[in-house]
Image: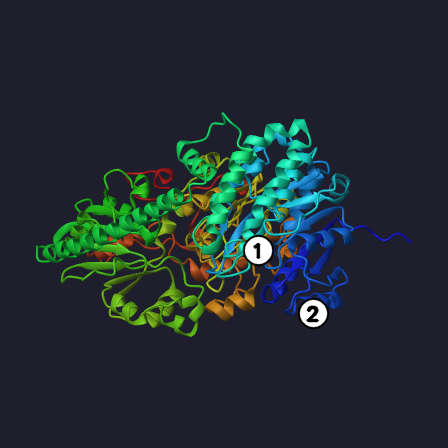
Amino acid sequence: MDVPVPRFSVIVPAYQVQAYLHECLASVLSQSYPDLELVVVDDCSPDACGEIADECAERDARVRPVHLPRTEGPGPARNAGMERAAGDYLVFLDGDDTLAPDALRGIADRIKETGEPDVVVYGHARAYWTGETVPDRAAAHLTEQGPAPFPLTGRPGLLTLPAVAWNKAVRREFAEREGIVFPPGGHEHTPWSYPLLMAARSLATLDRVCVHHRQRRRGGGPATPDERHLDVFAQYDRVFAYVESDPELARWRPVLFRRMADHLTTVLAPGRLPRSVRAEFLRRAGVHCRRYRVPGTHVPPAVRLRHGLLRLGLRRTYEALRLASALRRRTLKGCAKLLGRTRTAALRLHYRVQRRLPLRADRALFADAGGRGYGGNPGALEEAFRTFAPHVRTAWAADPAHHHTVPPGTRRLAPDTAAYWTALARSRYLVHHTGLDAGLVKRRGQVLVRTPAGTPLKHTGLDLREHPAAARGTDFGRLLDDVDSWDHLVSPNRHSTLTWERVFPGRYATLEFGQPRSDVLQRATAADVTRLRETLGIPEGTVALLYAPAYRDYRRTQRAGLDLERLVTRLGPRYMVLARAHPRHGGPLTTARHDRIVDVTGHPSVEALCLASDALVTDYSALMFDYAGLDRPIVVHTDEREAFEAACGTYVDLRSCPPGAMARDEDELIGVFSGGDWCGPRSAQLRAAFRERFCPHDDGRVAERVVRRVVLGEADLPPVVPLAERRPAPSAAAALSRPPLATVPQPAGPRTVTDSL
């Protein structure tokens, strides 16, 4: 009986990585693509690596442990794994690395798309011990545009990628035919990776982070001071011997020389070589640079100087220049720090002087969180100030990079400048949604309006004392001092009012008028929706899903809870995804390259994205409360519910009052859309009840009511339009099946809805 051949053989050499090996093996065995074998090579490790491999083999038949009788080193250990591998393709991991979720599925799909290439090169990210994950900077060479597969001459930039084993999937038959194996010693990746790329007749790339390469705090890597770094010279001898074995490979000699020189310079960095071998290393570096240098090769002057010093073996000159460069950097850093402190002291003095000057009753200062651009609740109120209280001159504080988002007629201020502190000291009205500068001293006569962002779903304020992972070192004493400065708190609904008055106890007045940023959603027309979809490149007839997950406070690294490539593939060409990460995410939500996945994290207006989409897919984001006001489908993906509730706490049980269809995992989510439940009558019924509870005042005139009460002092405010009479703009998908509806009549303003987005 023939034994099935697995698609992948994942080879993991293990030596003194017992603290990380469990996580490494689990990342492989939990892959959504299960057609694999896991070959774990215990390199006679003195710790528990061998036992861990055996325990995994007892639990999962796909694990094949290999125990070497003596320690051979990572290269021979990988060779031992290759000898026992049976899969179509070989995938390599270090014992402390991890495979990204759904990585093997992505690699398998790319192999199928490109016709079984010899090698697939994919992306990786360096996972630092601090929790930071940084994608490789050379990933631009992994673009999937253009013909594939291709020879190395079609994408020579692949030689500039890290020469490592764990960023490539290699066809096993090709590797066996070429006889390319790992050598003994350190830096063993080098004479394996370069010949592999040069020998491959067909290459393909996958622009996706598939491996998280751990960067440990100390030990276990090429950054460790070790005499084995001298092995790098023998490894490059092997590389150039391979080049010299075939005259056709001579074309690659210049780029390989530069890669070698850069590699040697990297090893020379402080902390990598023991002091006792630095002189020997520089001497041998000079020999190699003279031996393999290709005359006439153009390189930048700075690189030429570095390579020349290596080639001439000028150890003292090289180290003197390195020390001078380090001294220059430290001096500049110290001067910058001193100048920064002096500037801060001068600005604080300026602020104290300005606080003694009269308030300007016709000035208002607005800002969003973190110096971001114009928008949100403060943006809606700023527009209402200019419309209903035109005698008040408004200013917006944001980083200069976001000044282009501020509308004409509004003064632009950069935080922590003299003009900003002047406005903070002398403006009568201060409007912000997370708190202004920590140095604010509220003056008598100033009016501070707090506009929290969204209806509270997870715990906030004083309730965070019970959730340290979400609190992240919050100073609760300072929080209460900030609350004492509030005059008004704008609340969208009764749930928010009751929650905030308890967790933010203070003497402020709650204005339960609705969510100001929802006004633009209610005022938009079908024509506005069409224009917004065109600017985002959404084809006509496409169902656009806005995917906006919440920030997970309990995770040190954020990731998408869905495999978006699989989602759009399963749903078919009618669907596309607009992926938006939380502002605290710090980067794009996905690295996937797909014509039906658009990362809109950097889009300046979440309201525009809501209007352009046909449905919202989220987990625990407060955006669902705003989106419900549009009366469009909402699908809740409740992955990691127990972890989220334990770490953050929740005020609303979405299981008892969901805004629409719910899915516990990715397959259920796909079923919700493929089966039509996302827009069915049950979904509409749930959404109606959700709107009634959380959107009672969002009729398009919320900001107007706030301005009339706070600035104009009016008590008789415009009545709230009942829910049944509101007509928000239909989505593009809904507009195809029903006639256009009139929107709620609005007072004339200076800007159109599209302009305000």
- Point out the tag, 1 or 2, that comes first from the N-terminus: 2
Instruction: State which quarter of the image contains the C terminus.
Output: top left
Question: Circle 1 is placed at which residue position?
Answer: 683
Find the distance from the CA under tag 1 to the CA under tag 2.
51 Å
Q: Amino acid at mark 1?
A: Ser
Instruction: Name the secondary structure under disc 1.
Output: helix
Q: Nearer the viewer, mark 1 or mark 2?
A: 2
Question: Which residue sits at x=78%, y=51%?
Answer: 86
Q: Nearer the viewer, residue 204 or 425?
A: 204
> Residue visible at 28% across and 55% down?
432
Picture coordinates of residue 650 (x, y %)?
Answer: 47, 68
Q: In front: 649, or 520? A: 649
Residue that protrudes farthest toward the left in the picture: 357
Q: Are marks 1 and 2 in contact (CB under 8 Å)?
A: no
Position of 669 with respect to 460 (left or right) is right
Residue identified by numbered label 2: 51
Q: Residue at x 71, y 69 (%)?
A: 55
Element type where label 2 sits in the image: helix
**Quadrant in the picture for the N terminus:** bottom right
Q: Is residue 650 visible?
A: no
Q: Position of residue 397 (x, y in %)?
A: 26, 48
